Amino acid sequence: MPRIGGGRWAGPGGGRRLIVGTGPVLGALADGDTLGLAVTWGSYASTIGGTLATAREMRLGAGNWASYDGDVEVSAGEDWQIRETVSLSGLTLSRTFLSGVSAVVALEPAWSAPIAGNGLPDLTLYIGGDPVVIDVSSDFDLGNPTASLAPVGTLPAWASWSSPNVTLDPGEVSDATSATLVFRATNVIDTADTGFQVAIISPYAAPTYTVSLGAIVEGQTVGAPGSGANVQPTLSGGAGVPAAALTWSATVDGSPASLPITAVAGTDIVLTASDASHPTGAFSASSSPVTVSAAATLSIDTAPTLSSVAPVEGNTIAATPGTVSGGESTRTWRWYSGATLLQEGPSAAYTITATSVGGTIFAQQVEIPLGSGSPVTRDSAPSGTVVPLVFSILDNDNGTAAITFTEGAESRVFYEIPDGPYQGTYDLDLGVLQTLPVCIATPALTGTATVGELLTSVAFYWVYNPDLGDLVVEDGWETGGEVIADASGLTHLVGEAEAGLATGRTETGTQAGASGPVIVRGPTRQIASGSVQPVISDLAIVRTGYSELRISADVTNVGDGALHVVAGDLLSPNARQISQGLTGEGEPAFRVGSTPITAPGVVAVAVSAFSEGPEIIEVAVAQISISDDPSNVLSGVTSLPPPTATGGSVIIAGPIFDPADWIIGAIGGGHIRFTGA
């Protein structure tokens, strides 16, 4: 049976492939790889049922085809290709699927920058220090396989080589010295060198440490760093030498004392850090003597004060501390209602609860001296009598609700609407409602968002404090952020000027006693571009990988809807068929894709998983707007030559063909395409 056109089997009834599939893929190959490492075999199916049999073959360069052997080792400079021949039982036909040609590349040794943090490429060692082992291959990130790895020249006596490691032992030298060590990686393609400088430094100088001890107050504890004592020393210095294993000790008035120390007024305290086994020999560093000062006599000179928040259940009241003299201290707060302790801790704020209703609240400032001494306290003046939070909601059945609540309340309450268009739970800030009305719900618009159709809104839901006066709500409509003249009410007839813009409803709430009007814009609807016919131009087809195409077109006038793409043996599909992923005969296209359009301009769609290699591929694109208007159809024919071995080729295909340029003729029931004149 003859094969016609773009690889389709033709016969009575015409134009139908009996065997379909993806075809094999041969990926990138490197010198020394086995062929099977880069092979992905195709998958196949019969469009009329039956059993398929597959024969797999390979060839080197332009040589003869041979049975596939995945264990064959490839070499740099060779070209390899594979194929699968698929036959259908009971019929004397078969179809052959070819992979692209893969050129075997060589890998040269390539040194990358040293791994961050390993101290390379410059290394400093000290006489008497510990040996250092460097893995030359991994520390220098030699990513490619090598036939050999070795130092260049003779290594110093204090360096020894055992591939891939070099061991540097400064303990084997007695004088300061330095050397540059170079290493060479070699394979059958090339060689590459890298190196680093090693400096051997004279024996360590004794580390220089400084111990500092801050002020100490009677009754405080003094201890080593990390001990948790009130006063701890700070240690500085010691850079550039091995860390010391420090031991801490103390004297009080010149006599040894165990740490931690409880400070006594008038005594002198010294802390010492020492290391008896440091490589430089024993050393120590001491702080200057610090005389312990007597504990301060604290005083809270002015009483703490409470904020002016009304004493209403749910409100949060805050305290400002009074001035403190007589020394350093830490602060805490106690909150009372009468003799009842309500809260204790560092917080200077308290949220009033129902337990305080009917009583008063005061804050107690507590100052705790550093070191010895007793805390001192001072109370604020009491608040007014705490009143309960009482509020009620009156739904006016018109999208507004009056909320009355205890005067001065600033807390938050939850308002639940169980059903209807405003269903939900809303968080109301009573502090805001003391000065402004609040809109809590803006339901979505309904209707058809096209020119000449009605959009319908539900009145927004407002809550307000009637103490500020009656709530007056005025409404209007906007499109594209601009007010629509003479538009109001809950319905709106969409005008031609709104095509392609966002239209929505607004409400403005005012009260005579409010601090200002509140303007609320509700949800919008994007208006379709009406009956404007979409027009697309400038089809471009770019190959981005072995099995990937990037297909783009210029959306010239209607910036909505979607751009649809089909590819394969198309047979002149119209725009509707393209949007449905069909060929001109109503059959599923070989590959399809689409992407949304948000504005005029160039729009691209990626289509992948082509496996037919150099066979002919047809591509067609069309736009369908959100008003369901189809655009013109742009079509192109392109071949898919194989990429380079690395898959890096980018091939621009074309030219662009209009469906009017297609000449379709019938030959033996099959189809044949001619493009151009």
Image (spheres, helix red, strand yellow):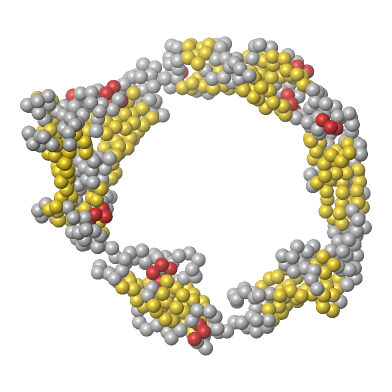
Report the residue at 23% width, 43% height from top.
42
- Which residue is more in the foreground, 519 or 174? 174
**Up-down: is 399 above or below 631?**
above
Q: Is residue 539 left or right of residue 427?
A: left
Residue 217 visible at all = yes
Quadrant location of the N terminus in the rendered image: top left
Q: Is residue 594 left or right of residue 303?
A: left
Q: Position of residue 542 (x, y in %)?
A: 27, 40
Q: Position of residue 644 (x, y in %)?
A: 23, 51
Q: Is residue 166 left or right of residue 9?
A: right
Report the residue at 87% width, 49% height from top.
366
* Residue 72: quadrant of the picture: bottom left
Q: Position of residue 313 (x, y in %)?
A: 81, 29
**Up-down: is 171 above or below 418?**
below
- Which residue is more in the foreground, 352 or 380? 352
* Residue 623: quadrant of the picture: top left
Report the residue at 69% width, 16% height from top.
401
Q: Is residue 245 left or right of residue 312?
A: left
**Up-down: is 447 above or below 239?**
above
Residue 496 visible at all = no
Q: Position of residue 284 (x, y in %)?
A: 71, 79
